[in-house]
């Protein structure tokens, strides 16, 4: 008689057989990240699902609670196909792996996504789409970065640029969790020496800065045939003087209540909707002209 090892082996499950685990096991230490990199812990079903859809090869290990089993068959099959480990663990162990109790019952440990270096030549090719481009220049809260990515993906934007500002937050575990999959639906770029880059983009783009207490109200921003490049600064200090000098216009969003300011992610939501609608209208081809004529009278056929 051939003996078979049970699926509830103390080791992580690998191979081509999908799991049917019912006994949570302690997870071993996480694997070392590649030199110079740090593995991400992507938590929450929307974020994990987007990761498996966009780049399953980046997932190094996969953990989940028992309640998630009905929803993760394709994820486990992907891990089995790549011969990478995956396992059910209890809530306490999953919280330890995720580094937070807000994991939603599922965590993928993944290789980080590298930012593409942005060149003036590349950004000039985007101008034909008329879609506004958003740049984060010193947004320091990773939750805000994630919320902005989620907002842009919701409105159908394709790209997000992060500058090399020393205060600019990167793509952390919390950014992925808050983005709820939005980061996987965007092309992500790094802009070095942003002021110099902005100088090279003029006059092909309308460069718009944002500010709390100065600039023109958003509703007074005139239409412009050029695509907009919108820059969001640090939550506390705003845009740097060097970046502000490059802005053709600075806009603000006027409120009517007692609270003085909006969160930067809410500001992006308003601008993304307003400027996206404006850009779509400008990109829409004009309707053909209709020639007005008098009433139509069909010609009577002459008898043969």
Image (tube, helix red, strand yellow):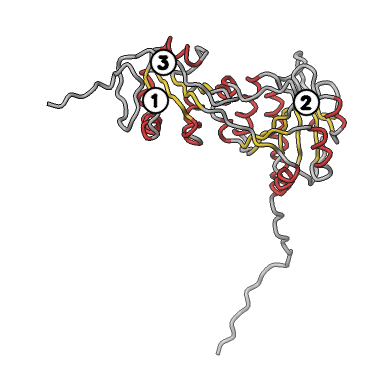
Position of residue 27 in the picture relative to residue 278 (left or right): left
On residue 253, the disc is 2
- The quadrant of the image that shows the N terminus is top left
Residue 91 x/y as whole percent: 42, 12
Q: Nearer the viewer, residue 118 or 264?
A: 118
Residue found 67% across the figure and 69% down from its top:
296
Q: Which comes before the other along the chain, label 3 or label 2?
A: 3
Crowd band around label 1 with a 10 angstrom C-alpha radius: few (<14), some (14–19), many (20+): some
Residue 97 x/y as whole percent: 47, 15
Residue at the extreme left of the image, as rendered: 1
How far apart marks 3 and 1 lie (CA) works out to: 11 Å
How far apart marks 2 and 1 lie (CA) works out to: 49 Å
Q: Is residue 188 above or below residue 129?
A: above
Residue found 72% across the figure and 43% down from its top:
123
Q: Can you identify the residue that label 3 sits on?
A: 28
Q: Identify the element where label 3 is drawn.
A: loop
Q: Which comes before the other along the chain, label 3 or label 1?
A: 3
Q: Identify the element where label 2 is drawn.
A: loop
Marks 2/1 in contact by CB < 8 Å: the verdict is no
Q: Nearer the viewer, residue 45 or 112?
A: 112
- The quadrant of the image that shows the C terminus is bottom right
How far apart marks 3 and 2 lie (CA) works out to: 50 Å
Residue at the extreme bottom of the image, as rendered: 304
Crowd band around label 3 with a 10 angstrom C-alpha radius: few (<14), some (14–19), many (20+): few
Quadrant of the rendered structure where residue 176 is?
top right
Residue found 34% across the figure and 19% down from its top:
11
- Numbered disc in front, either 3 or 2: 3
Q: Can you identify the residue that label 1 sits on?
A: 85
Crowd band around label 2 with a 10 angstrom C-alpha radius: few (<14), some (14–19), many (20+): some
């Amino acid at each position: 008689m051939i003996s078979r090892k049970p699926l509830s082996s103390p080791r992580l499950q690998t191979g081509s057989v999908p799991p049917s685990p019912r006994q949570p096991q302690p997870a071993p230490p996480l694997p070392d990240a590649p030199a110079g990199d740090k593995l991400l812990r992507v938590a929450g079903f929307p974020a994990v699902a987007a990761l498996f859809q966009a780049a399953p090869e980046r997932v190094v290990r996969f953990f989940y609670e028992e309640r998630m089993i009905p929803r993760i068959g394709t994820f486990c099959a992907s891990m089995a196909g790549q011969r990478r480990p995956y396992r059910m663990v209890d809530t306490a162990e999953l919280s330890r792996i995720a580094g937070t109790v807000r994991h939603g019952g599922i965590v993928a440990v993944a290789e980080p996504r590298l930012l593409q270096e942005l060149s003036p030549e590349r950004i000039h090719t985007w101008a034909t789409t008329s879609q506004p481009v958003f740049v984060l220049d010193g947004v320091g809260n990773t939750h805000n970065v994630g919320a902005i990515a989620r907002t842009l993906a919701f409105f159908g934007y394709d790209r997000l640029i992060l500058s090399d500002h020393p205060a600019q937050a990167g793509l952390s575990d919390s950014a992925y969790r808050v983005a709820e999959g939005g980061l996987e639906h965007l092309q992500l770029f790094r802009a070095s020496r942003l002021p110099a880059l902005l100088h090279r983009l003029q006059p092909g783009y309308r460069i718009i800065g944002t500010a709390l207490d100065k600039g023109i109200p958003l509703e007074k921003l005139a239409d412009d045939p050029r695509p907009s490049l919108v820059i969001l600064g640090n939550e506390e200090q705003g845009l740097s003087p060097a970046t502000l000098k490059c802005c053709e216009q600075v806009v603000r969003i006027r409120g009517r209540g007692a609270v003085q300011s909006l969160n930067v992610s809410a500001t992006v939501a308003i601008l993304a909707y307003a400027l996206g609608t404006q850009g779509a209208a400008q990109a829409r081809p004009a309707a053909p002209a209709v020639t007005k004529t008098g009433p139509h009278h069909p010609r009577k056929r002459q008898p043969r």
